[in-house]
Image (cartoon, helix red, strand yellow):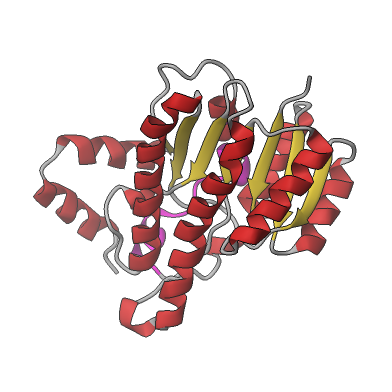
Amino acid sequence: MAKRIFISGAAQGIGAAIATFFHQNKWIVGIYDLDQVKAQALAQSLGDGAFAGELNVIDYASWQNALADFVKHSGGLDILVNNAGILYSGAFEDTPIEAHHRTVDVNVKGVLNGCHAALPYLKHAKNARVINLSSASAIYGQADLASYSSSKFAVRGITEGLDIEWRKHGIRVFDVMPLFVQTDMVTDMDAGSIKNMGVNLQPNDIAKAVWKLATGHTLLKNTHHPIGTSTKWMYRLSAMSPQLINRLSNIYLTRR
């Protein structure tokens, strides 16, 4: 029986790459997004085994409706990927407070809603998993990305907590932590870190990382998965070095 994966924010970028990669490997994929037109277009291009619909991640009822729609077509749910997210960059004080609030709504509440709404389905699957899209900015708070960075720290905390708590259900919860990925999200991004470190990852790099977490045995898999050489270096440095060194290294990386 084919495995089933539901992806939020899957109409384009990383989400679309994940959906395409899994569909190519004979999974049933759920492509759900606020932009239902793009989601449906991607599902139609992939063909049989791809289903699409509308999902507003900040609306719990929308999650319930989207998951019920997918399970009606697929017969169940094995993997939830909380991919939907937004990013505002630039000086904290120059960013409207409404943008900071929306970052928290989408990036944090969206993940909470998704995990909560999906649990009744995941509990019925063998080796079910949740894979959250976190970020390298959850390693140390980032200048010009304060609200985005804090939202990804929250995703990191949700991931850690549920990975322990949901052992009772036989569910593993992971996150992937890429640096900057070549998508529309980083176009015209105003932050010193992207200017200094560049964009070295493609959406398919993230799709392959998600695939590794979604397949095979999970007993010894770590909860967090930094992606890319720079992120792995930052992650290891943060674990080994004093806070002062972490702060100074991030000041250097985000200098203008």
Determine whether, in the image, residue 209 is placed left or right of residue 9. left
| Quarter of the picture holding the C terminus | bottom left
**Which span is picked out in magenta?**
191-208
Is 195 included in the stretch rendered in magenta? yes
Image coordinates of residue 237 in percent, x first then y, are 22, 38
Out of 223 and 233, give the one closest to the viewer. Answer: 223
Whether 7 is drawn above or below 108: the answer is: above
Instruction: List x then y, in percent, for residue 173.
Output: 46, 34
Q: Residue at x 58, y 30 (%)?
A: 123
Dominant SS in magenta? helix
In the image, what residue occupies the spot 15% across and 55% down? 248
Q: Quadrant of residue 162?
A: top left
Residue 220 placed where, x, y %?
A: 40, 17
Which residue is painted at 64% across and 54% down in the image?
63
Quadrant of the frame with the N terminus: top right
| Residue 148 is one of the magenta-drawn residues | no
Residue 213 visible here: yes
**In front of the other: 167 or 228:** 167
- Relative to 216, is 120 above or below? below
Q: Residue at x 50, y 52 (%)?
A: 111
Measured as percent of width and height from the top left, residue 46 is found at: 85, 41
